[in-house]
Amino acid sequence: MTRGLVVLGAGDHATVVIDACATAGIPVYGLLDNDRQSEVLGTAVLGDDSLLDDAAFAAAHDFHIAITDTAKRARLADTVTEHQGTLATVVHRAAVVSQHTVVGNGCFFAAGAVVNPGSRLGRCVIVNTTASVDHDCHLDDHVHVAPGARLAGKVHCGELATVGTGAVVLPGVEVGAGATVGAGATVTRDVPAGATVIGSPARVVQ
């Protein structure tokens, strides 16, 4: 990456992304945020998302979306690509991502994250702090694997799914598109699309 990175979002997750960029030697040019904070960890907020409408601005930078809300992340990713912007992947120096994986544009791997061989990740997937994705998993676009979550081998998470903090998904289980696995849950069977599951073993509550 030779161009300065623009981070979209200036909330708590942005601090994690900025710190990861520092460990990886990725220069952060600035942030865009609709709440217009002045700076985050010394990185200036340049303006709001309307700057993406400037074709010259979009062409001059790479972009990373530092927002954990899957639906918002998906909308911003579409906006960036519609304006011919480039979505950049950020890997913390303390993350381990196997060279035998397929990783889409715009993904984020936080400190301590592990992704094992044979896994396939779509665009803008987050594997957060100390989360692990074991062998041959398939994570569709905009999936968020929250801090400390564990996906065993051959798990499939559909688009926009969220696996909550400290949750465990057993081998071969499917987490449907848009589903939410609650913090600390143990998922032993497939989760329907759009459902929310909690508990151990996990049960559908919504």
Image (spheres, grey):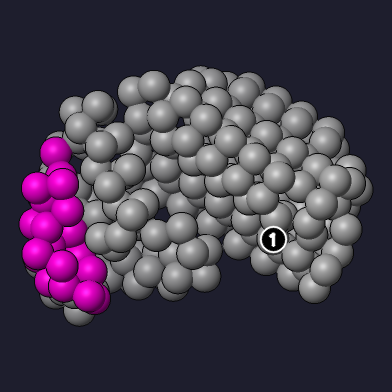
Relative image position of residue 16 (x, y in whole percent): 33, 43
Residue 121 in picture, x, y percent from top left: 57, 42
Residue 165 percent coordinates (x, y): 60, 45
Nearest the eye: 47 or 1: 47
Q: Amino acid at mark 1?
A: Thr
Looking at the image, residue 166 lies above or below residue 40 = above
Residue 7 appears anywhere in the view: yes
Q: Residue at x 15, y 67 (%)?
A: 37
Residue sitting at x 11%, y 50%: 43
* Up/down of 172 relative to 135, above or below: below
Q: Which span is picked out in magenta?
A: 27-47
- Residue shown at 68%/27% (left/top)? 134
- The residue where tag 1 is placed is 180
Q: Is residue 54 above or below residue 188?
A: below
What x and y, as percent, mark residue 110?
Answer: 42, 35
Secondary structure of the residue carrying numbered label 1: strand
Give the camera-side residue of 75 and 1: 75
Q: Is residue 28 magenta?
A: yes
Q: Nearer the viewer, residue 199 or 68?
A: 199
